[in-house]
């Protein structure tokens, strides 16, 4: 039985990866300091013999006894509302945390996959974004703590690959959604659905012409799993190229929820990307992967999840938002 360590394993994406690797017959160790993760996401796995949970900060020294075949580094705040609150831990998990995971991978002879992001492209001058584009990032802007942490993470990972021979994989993740998202993570989709469920006006920043491309979590996990098992070491975009403006997306949420909210407009946050669309040519050619779940079906599943949450959660997490 192969053993995988998933850092950020109690988070939105990390918990879905725990599910997938266990389904594939692996033993899984989830590690999380629970700054943005939630044990509810993995409580269904706790009784399983092939699952363990370590409450630990990967920015500190990591010790895992015994065999380790894979390390998937998904520990990091992933939305502006988080990394604006905890900028230094965000930088540390992308730098020190990545260094610790790479050192562990080297010691164990494990293959390491890092969760990079479309944010390495910044506010892009190229559209759609392909993996050869170097990006347009403001290193000292409010988003710089996340963007540069991820860019450093990629550089450190490639250095360990070329200098130490560590088997590494780099996935650049575009906007993803689905069950287990946090209502208070500040991103457009949970914010819009939360506002609709509370009967509030839906907040759009700028004129809403900025675009995003939303990928359902099951599709994303499939792409990550294929990349993990591949022999490809350079970055690979995983996301859904079905692009939509934020204003049109807000209208879709109103139609989905059957509510009668107004759309209100507020100033666009500093350095907010105007366009976001992945070029997934590389994923298609190398992994044979492309998304299968339509936005209509994915939104329906996600809405059902949010509707199932206790009513107090809707109000506990309500606050002004920014979005990624």
Image (spheres, helix red, strand yellow):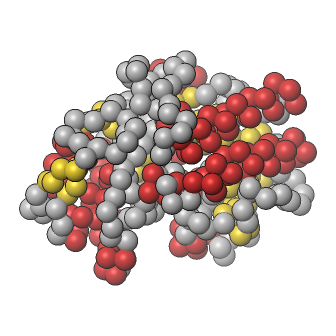
* Residue in front for this viewpoint, 59 or 256: 59
* Residue in front for this viewpoint, 159 or 48: 159
Q: Tell me: residue 295, above or below residue 25.
A: above
**Can the viewer see residue 223 in this picture?**
no
In this picture, residue 193 sits left or right of residue 34 = left
Question: Residue at the spot x=49%, y=55% of the render?
Answer: 84
Percent across and percent down for residue 65 are 89, 60
Residue 161: quarter of image: top right
* Residue in front for this viewpoint, 258 or 24: 258
Question: Residue at the spot x=23%, y=68% of the render?
Answer: 197
In this picture, residue 164 sits left or right of residue 294 = right
Q: Tell me: residue 185, above or below residue 312.
A: above
Residue 179: quarter of image: bottom left
Residue 226: quarter of image: top right
Q: Tell me: residue 293, above or below residue 126.
A: below
How many numbered marks are there? 0
Percent across and percent down for residue 303 are 29, 61
Question: Residue at the spot x=55%, y=64% of the render?
Answer: 36
Percent across and percent down for residue 137 are 50, 31
Percent across and percent down for residue 132 are 55, 18
Q: Tell me: residue 239, above or below residue 92.
A: above
**Can the viewer see residue 112 in this picture?**
yes
Question: Residue at the spot x=79%, y=59% of the render?
Answer: 60
* Residue in front for this viewpoint, 280 or 116: 116
């Amino acid at each position: 039985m192969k053993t995988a360590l998933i850092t950020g394993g109690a988070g939105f994406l990390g918990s879905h990866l725990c599910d997938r690797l266990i389904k594939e017959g692996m033993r899984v160790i989830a590690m999380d300091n629970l700054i943005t993760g939630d044990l509810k996401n993995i409580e269904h796995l706790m009784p399983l013999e092939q699952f363990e949970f370590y409450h630990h900060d990967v920015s500190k020294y990591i010790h895992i006894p015994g065999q380790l075949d894979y390390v998937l580094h998904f520990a990091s705040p992933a939305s502006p509302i988080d990394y604006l609150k905890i900028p230094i831990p965000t930088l540390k998990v992308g730098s020190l945390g990545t260094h610790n995971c790479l050192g562990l991978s080297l010691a164990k002879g494990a293959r390491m996959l890092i969760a990079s992001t479309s944010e390495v492209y910044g506010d892009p001058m190229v559209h759609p974004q392909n993996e050869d584009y170097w990006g347009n990032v403001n290193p000292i802007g409010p988003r710089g703590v996340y963007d540069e942490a991820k860019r450093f993470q990629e550089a450190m990972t490639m250095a360990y690959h070329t200098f130490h021979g560590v088997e590494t994989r780099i996935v650049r993740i575009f906007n993803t959604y689905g069950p287990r998202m946090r209502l208070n993570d500040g991103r457009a989709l949970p914010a819009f659905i939360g506002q609709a469920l509370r009967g509030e006006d839906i907040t759009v920043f700028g004129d809403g012409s900025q675009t995003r491309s939303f990928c359902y979590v099951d599709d994303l996990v499939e792409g990550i799993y294929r990349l993990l098992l591949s022999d490809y070491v350079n970055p690979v975009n995983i996301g859904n190229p079905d692009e939509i403006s934020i204003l049109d997306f807000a209208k879709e949420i109103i139609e989905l929820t059957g509510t009668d909210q107004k759309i209100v407009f507020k100033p666009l946050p500093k350095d907010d990307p105007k366009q976001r669309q992945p070029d997934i040519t590389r994923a298609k050619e190398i992994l044979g992967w492309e998304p299968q779940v339509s936005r209509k079906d994915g939104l329906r599943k996600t809405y059902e999840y949010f509707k199932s949450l206790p009513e107090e959660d809707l109000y506990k997490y309500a606050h002004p938002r920014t979005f990624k």
